[in-house]
Structures are given as C-alpha cells and as structure tokens.
Image: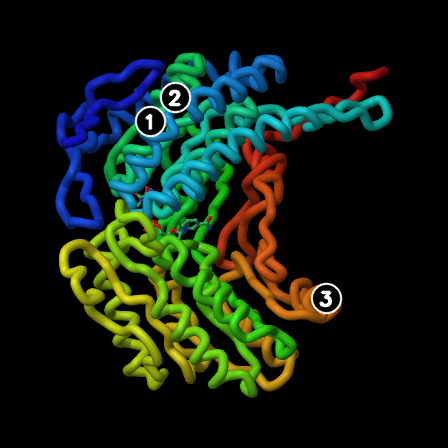
Amino acid sequence: MKNHTKQYINGEWVDSASGETIDVINPATGEAFGKIANGNAEDVDKAVEAAHDVYIEFRNTPVEERCAMLDRIVTEYEKRKDDLIEAITDELGSPIDKSEKVHYQMGLNHFAAARDALDTFQFEEQRGDNLIVKEAIGVSGLITPWNFPTNQTSLKLSAAFAAGSPVVLKPSEETPFAAVILAEIFDKAGVPKGVFNLVNGDGGGVGNPLSEHPKVRMMSFTGSGATGSKIMEKASVDFKKVSLELGGKSPLIILDDSDVKEAASLAVQKVVHNTGQVCTAGTRTIIPASMKDEFLSAVKEEMTNVKVGDPRTEGTQMGPLISKKQYDTVQSYINKGVEEGATLYHGGTDHPQGLDKGFYVKPTVFSDVENKMTIAQEEIFGPVMSVITYNDLDEAIEIANDTKYGLAGYVFGEDMETLKKVARSIEAGTVEINGAKGGSDLPFGGYKQSGIGREWGDFGIDEFLEVKSIKGYFK
Ligand code: NAD
C-alpha cells in the first residue's frame, strides 16, 4: 500500500488535523492501493497562513531568482520521471506509454514554458511619465481534477511561481500521488518555505474552505462546471479573482475533400485518448452527409483496432475510466443515446470482453445523431463519438457552435482557405487544423461555459498578477 497521510505545509510534512484518510483506488483493478489525508478547514487555514506569511517576500524576489528556481524544478522533475510515470499509471489507469509521453511530458513542458516566458515577460512598462507594474496577486488557491494529474497541477504551479504568488494546492483526491511527488520535487528544488503548500482531501473538506478563505486572493480551478460555479460563488463573497477551466463538447469538422481513412483515424484518436476523459475531446464528429457510409466503416475499423486493456501491458492504447462513478455515467449516456433515437453503430454498454475487473468500457460510436440530443450536448467524459452529418459548410459551422461550451474545435481537410475559414468561425479557445500540435506557450482556455481566463506560458503568468499604475513615477 502507498500511504501518504501527511500534508505539506510551510516546507514540512505535517500531520493532518482530522487524522482521517481517503482510500485511493487503482481503476484497473477497482481496488484501493493507497491512502491520503482527508484534510479539513484547520489544515487549509495553516497552509494559507504559511503562504500569507511569505507572499510579500516572494512577490519581491528578483525575476532571475524565480528563473533559477524553475530551472531547479525542471532538473528535479526529470530525476523523478519513473516515479511520476508509476504514480500516474496506478492512480489514473493511463497506459504506461502515455503516462510517459503525455502526462509526464506535459508537466515538464509547463515548467519549462513558464521559465522561458520569464525571459521576455514585461513586468513593467513606462507610459509617458508613468509606470505600469504587474505584481504577484498573493496567496492563490489551486484546485485540480483527476484526468491529467501532472498537467493540470504543473500548469498552474509553474505560472504562479513565475509570477511570484505563493500557493495552496488541493489536487483531486482520486489522483493525489503525482502531486505528492511534485511536493517532494519542490522540496528538493529549494522552493522557499510557505511558497508551496499541499493540502490533500475532498471538495467539501478542503476545496470549500480554501475557496472562502479571506486571505486567499485568487482561485484557479480546473474541473466540472458545477464545481466551478460553487467556487465562483464562494470567491464572490470577498471578490477573489477566479480563473476557471471547465468542460467541453468539442466539434471535429471534417471537410468533403478529406481522405476518409485519415479523417477516421483522427476522429477515433480524439475520443479514445485518455479513455475520452479529456476536456478538449473532439466528441462531436461533424461529417458531410455524402461521406457517411464510407466514414463510418473506416471508423469502425479504427475502433476495432484500439487495444483496450491493462495500463501496464505493452501496446495498450486505452485503459479504464477513473472510477465506478465515471463508468456508471458513461453507461447511462450510452443508454440515453439509444433512448433518444441515435443509432448505436459500434461498442455499447458493459465491459469489453475479458475485462470485468476495473472500470473498462468499450470505445463507442453513435451515428444518426442530432445535435440537440443529450449525447451531443453534454460532456460524457468517456470514449463515445457522436457522428452528425451536414449538407454545406455553413450548416457544419452552425452545428459546431450550437453548444454551451467553447473549449476546443478541430477541422480536417485539404483546402487551406476553407480550413482557415472554419478555424476562425468556431467559437472556442483553441482550434486545431489537421491535428497540428501546439506548444505549451500558446494560451489555453474556454469561451462560453468552458471557463474564464487563459492558462499556459505568458498568458498563464498574467492570471497570477495584479496591474498597478504609478502616476508621476518618471517626473
Ligand atoms: P470536479 O469538479 O468534480 O472536481 C475537480 C476538483 O474540484 C477536485 O479536486 C475536487 O475535489 C474539487 N471539488 C469538488 N467539489 C468542490 C467544492 N465544492 N469546492 C471546491 N472544490 C471542490 O471535476 P472532476 O470530475 O475531477 O474532473 C472532470 C471535469 O473537469 C470535467 O468536467 C472536465 O471537462 C473538467 N476539466 C476541464 C479542463 C479544462 O482545462 N478546461 C481540464 C480537465 C478537466
């Protein structure tokens, strides 16, 4: 058993106030494999006080010092590569290969990107006789979900450290061990006492008191809309700044000049990656009506070839879902799709054959989906594709934007002018043309109900800063 029942507060591992613990489940077996502390308001208060005690000193550190600190973090992070991969594979059920190439790497990229952004980041600007100063906002509460344990935490932590804001992190209680390793990394890297604090626990016990603590000046949250709105409500009492990265129901528009096999391959990747537990998953596949039969059969072939299985087996492409709760949610959406009249074209409910233990599901495709159906409007957070047809490009764009979300969009085809036109028309924070990969220096965030604010690189640093005008500074 992997037990980490202490909290990291003011540079030390200390007992948690309640003495209670939470079991952490391995989704591949459905069994507990470790415990973490079930923190409470007392732990939160200690952590916030520790951060508050150092916020002015940390704000005033020279940029070069924060650069050096981020450099040391990168070095220590790389040393813990194997441990991070192990932890993510066990707690998330991510295939081991993806734990390395996606999860481990994304965390590293964020620390490196924040470090690079500091090289050119303008904290001060002269305008006439006056000075504009960007300075660290102060104590920041970070609350993260389970689907990308190192990515979600590292992107917030790297930005806050680069800005000079101390933090209290509450990671998801379902994937806490990667964050424990991050705490060990920061400890080794000499992050000053009080600048980083980790309080493990659940939303009610830790997330709530953190969101309403009067000495917290900013809440940065990634997770579901329902939780985001609760945090915003608490934060509104004393007007804390909020940065929210929420859900999505992203469209993939396939143009009529596409290679059907390549389009199908991309569409399948967009729904099976991380077992569909991706806020930017491209789960609404919008295709020309004329391409329907050919596209569906190419998708079926691709889906059949997706290797679902034990995350530790070499070659596994899709592991289990995170939890029994998530498994049940996905089952109920599949049933809902059938009830509302979509055609269950591939996959379906229940476990894949031979994978009865753990929270495995079948990659699933619905055809004849109308965009108003529940499966096309709500975020399923599982490997379920909804195929929707269009007759002309304007209709495709209309369908793409007919959603309360606006996190991401995808377009695939040959004609660059059409691809660009579609990319500009999709109402979303990130649009990807032909599967292009962007760097961690690009802003990330959502339109509409997908969130407030932008993260990653220099945009992420800006979130943890206040802006001050000093008039007459150069007189
Ligand atoms: P969740 O909202 O249930 O939980 C997220 C975090 O909030 C967890 O740490 C949880 O303990 C905490 N929390 C729960 N209740 C709380 C409360 N009342 N006050 C404060 N904190 C509370 O989300 P989840 O199930 O962990 O993650 C899945 C969701 O996250 C999906 O909707 C997904 O789209 C979204 N997500 C968004 C992004 C993005 O960048 N936009 C990225 C990943 C995931």
* Quadrant that contains the N terminus: top left
What amino acid type should be assigned to the residue bearing mark 1?
Answer: Ile
Which residue position is annotated with label 3?
A: 416
Residue 215 rendering spot, x and y as whole percentages: 42, 26
Most extreme residue toward the front is: 314
Instruction: Using the numbered discs, state the Cα–Cα distance from disc 3 to disc 1 in whole angstroms.
Output: 44 Å
Disc 3 on helix, strand or loop?
A: helix
Instruction: Using the numbered discs, state the Cα–Cα distance from disc 2 to disc 3 in whole angstroms.
Output: 44 Å
Q: Quadrant of residue 278?
A: bottom left
- Which residue is more in the foreground, 411 or 469? 411
Q: Is residue 300 left or right of residue 158?
A: left
Marks 2 and 3: which is nearer the front?
Answer: 3
Which residue position is annotated with label 1?
A: 181
Residue 287 rendering spot, x and y as whole percentages: 54, 78
Tags 1 and 2 in contact by the CB under 8 Å rule? Answer: yes
Q: Quadrant of residue 13?
A: top left
Task: Please determine whether, in this image, residue 20 is positioned above or below residue 12.
Answer: below
Is residue 203 in view? no
- Mark 2 or mark 3, earlier in chain: 2
Q: Quadrant of residue 393?
A: bottom right
Which residue position is annotated with label 2?
A: 185
Q: Is residue 260 left or right of residue 1?
A: right
Tags 3 and 1 in contact by the CB under 8 Å rule? Answer: no
Task: Please determine whether, in this image, residue 213 is positioned above or below residue 264.
Answer: above
Q: Label 1 neighbourhood size at 10 Å, few (<14), some (14-19), many (20+)?
A: some
- Mark 3 or mark 1, earlier in chain: 1
Residue 222 rendering spot, x and y as whole percentages: 42, 45
The image's colouring method is rainbow
